[in-house]
Image (cartoon, rainbow, N blue to C red):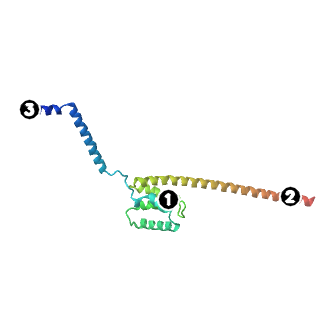
Amino acid sequence: MKNNTFNFYVVRTWLTPAFIVRVQKQLSILCIVYLAILTSACQMTAPTVNDSKSYSLYYLGLKNSTPEEILTKEKSLKILLKNKVRDDDVFIQGKLILIYSLSNSSLHNPYKAKRLLNEYLLAGDNITKENFAFIMMLRDQLNSQLHLLASQKASSEICEKDSDEHHLLIEKLQQQLKLLKQIDRNINERG
């Protein structure tokens, strides 16, 4: 009989709301600890950029290069592209775009850079997000440069046209002045 009383006591204790609440709290704490253990095993750092294929790092390297080094880099990249030595032709073309976009370089040619950039965007299937963002910023910069160059060319043409018109006007005035001097001499000789 004592055994039945004990069983009844255990069942009654387990089925009380206080006991259920205590078990729920312990299970919640256990789940939180388990989640903390699982998440601590995950790496929480940002993915690293492959430095060897980062346009921003290559551009910084170009900015610190001498003109001779830039010329050497351009020649070697052209050779790599021509000979198809490597599989990453798109990345090599991106490096050439950066060289031609470099404003303080003797190789600065925004027209060539923009042409290569358009080809690059058509061929570049596997461009990383970081490089794509850098290339889009470069595209905007090149578009601005080309717009400014076109405006400058138009202004130069207008100035040249105005200058030519002024020269013609001055020549006409000089001819009229000579004619007036000739008339004045003729009047003085007669008079």
Give the residue at mark 2: 183
Checking the image for residue 113, the label placed there is 1
**SS label for mark 1:** helix
Please say if the residues under marks 1 and 2 sit with CB atoms less than 8 Å apart. no
3D distance between C-alphas at marks 3 and 1: 91 Å
Judged by depth in the image, the label closer to the viewer, 3 or 1, is 3
**Image quarter hosting the C terminus:** bottom right
Which residue type carries mark 1?
Ala
Give the Cα distance between marks 3 and 2: 148 Å
Kindly identify the amino acid type of the residue bearing the numbered disc 3. Asn
- List the residue tagged with mark 3: 4
- Above or below, 142 against 17 in this view is below
Q: Quadrant of the N terminus?
A: top left
Label 1 packing within 10 angstroms: few (<14), some (14-19), many (20+): many
Which image quadrant is residue 187 in? Answer: bottom right
Tell me the quarter of the picture where residue 182 sits. Answer: bottom right
Residue shown at 27% from the left, 41% from the top: 29
Residue at position x 25%, y 42% in the image:
30
Q: Position of residue 50 (x, y in %)?
A: 39, 58
Looking at the image, is mark 3 or mark 2 nearer the viewer? 3
